[in-house]
Image: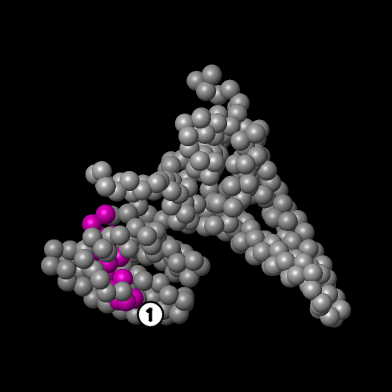
Amino acid sequence: MFYLGMDVAKAKLDCCLLLDEASGKRKTKVVKNTQSGIVDLLTWVAKQNVSPEALHIVMEATGIYHEQAAMALTDAGVMVSIINPAQVKDFGRGLAVRTKTDGVDSVVLARYGALLKPKAWVPPTQEARILQALLVRRAAIAQDLQRERNRQEKADATDTPALIHKSLEESIGFLVKQLAQLQKDIDAHIDKHSNLQKDRALLQSIPAIGPQVGSNMLSVMHNHDFGSAEQLAAYPGLVPVERQSGSSVLGRARMSKAGPARIRAVLYMAAVVGTRYNPHVKAIYERLLARGKSKMSSLGAAMRKLVHLCFGVLKTQQPYQHDYLKNA
């Protein structure tokens, strides 16, 4: 197996093909981040006597810019792994790499692949990708609406011209309609696909998981392959990070917050509700408070518990049971 590290940018792909792991012999290539650029890359790789079946490409998750390349390479029969940028950064530090350039990053990615041999990325289904796009758009419109309402509140409290008030009212009205239409589109899309409809119903069987949280967790779990509840909790950055060394460094544990903030936001509100209406979430929240933990720390644990419950109902394909621990 030959490993190729790919540093992804909006316009280009910096690639490093590791030809010999022992000696570190490698070749580099820069191509456009387009369909034709992927064709050029595969042609170049073939000239190095490397077939698509013998190639393992390692890239970082970089917003939306890696998606086209990952899909095109997978369709071409290449094994692709998509790595959390934080993991690659730590790996580079371990190699004493201090320089930060696209070319150097591609070398680090190639060595990461050769040493750790990460698992293959499994492309999400078309309906899962569409659902994610709809939810991201809805979140963006909701943020725009909140900003306009904040501006309207300031305008009402100050001497603001009537034309500005009119503009704000029209903008808010438009965004409200957009938000409502997007929600209809999301619901219609889920209802059109039986697998999405069934899984959302399972998620919403969990007390405190409503339509918004259910749809967002549905998208997360259908667009990514999680092998455990811990992996799912790590995706939105809900795992605790500790700082402790000997007797002198005793930092307080905190959430990593390494994933998408919009997922943490909806889970936070669900956890607040869950501390009252979900018996499992309520139990862990009250237990941690009794041990002297802060409310925020206890809510973080409540968020993780909700995520674990989400993983459980989809893995077992069974709805939530209030007394499942008693029946175990």
Q: Relative to 39, is 78 above or below?
A: above
Left/right placement of residue 232 relative to residue 129 reads left
In the visual, does 209 lie left or right of 302?
right
| Residue 46, quarter of the rendered image | bottom left
Q: Is residue 52 left or right of residue 178?
A: left
Q: Amino acid at mark 1?
A: Val
Q: Is residue 216 above or below residue 144?
A: above
Depth check: 144 or 39 in front?
144
**Rendering quarter of residue 89:** bottom left
Q: Is residue 67 visible?
A: yes
Q: Is-magenta flag for residue 108?
A: yes
Residue 114 at what x, y percent from top left? Answer: 24, 59
Q: Position of residue 160 (x, y in %)?
A: 81, 78
Q: Report the residue marked by disc 1.
A: 31
* Picture colour scheme: one colour
Residue at the extreme left of the image, as rendered: 23
Quarter of the rendering containing residue 175: bottom right
Crowd tier of the residue under label 1, counting other residues whose Cα lies within 10 Å: few below 14, some 14–19, many 20 or above: some
Vertical comparison of 82 with 43: above or below: above
Residue 167 magenta-drawn? no
Q: Main secondary structure of the magenta part?
A: helix
> Quick check: can you spot residue 219?
no
Q: Which residues are magenta?
A: 101-116
Looking at the rendered structure, the number of numbered marks drawn on it comes to: 1
Q: Residue at x 29, y 48 (%)?
A: 249
Q: Residue at x 28, y 60 (%)?
A: 91
- Residue shown at the point (17%, 71%) measured from the top left: 25
Query: Quick one: quadrant of the N terminus?
Result: bottom left
Near-viewer residue (99 or 71) = 99
Q: Secondary structure at mark 1?
A: strand
Spot occupied by residue 282 in the image (x, y as percentages of width and height): 58, 32
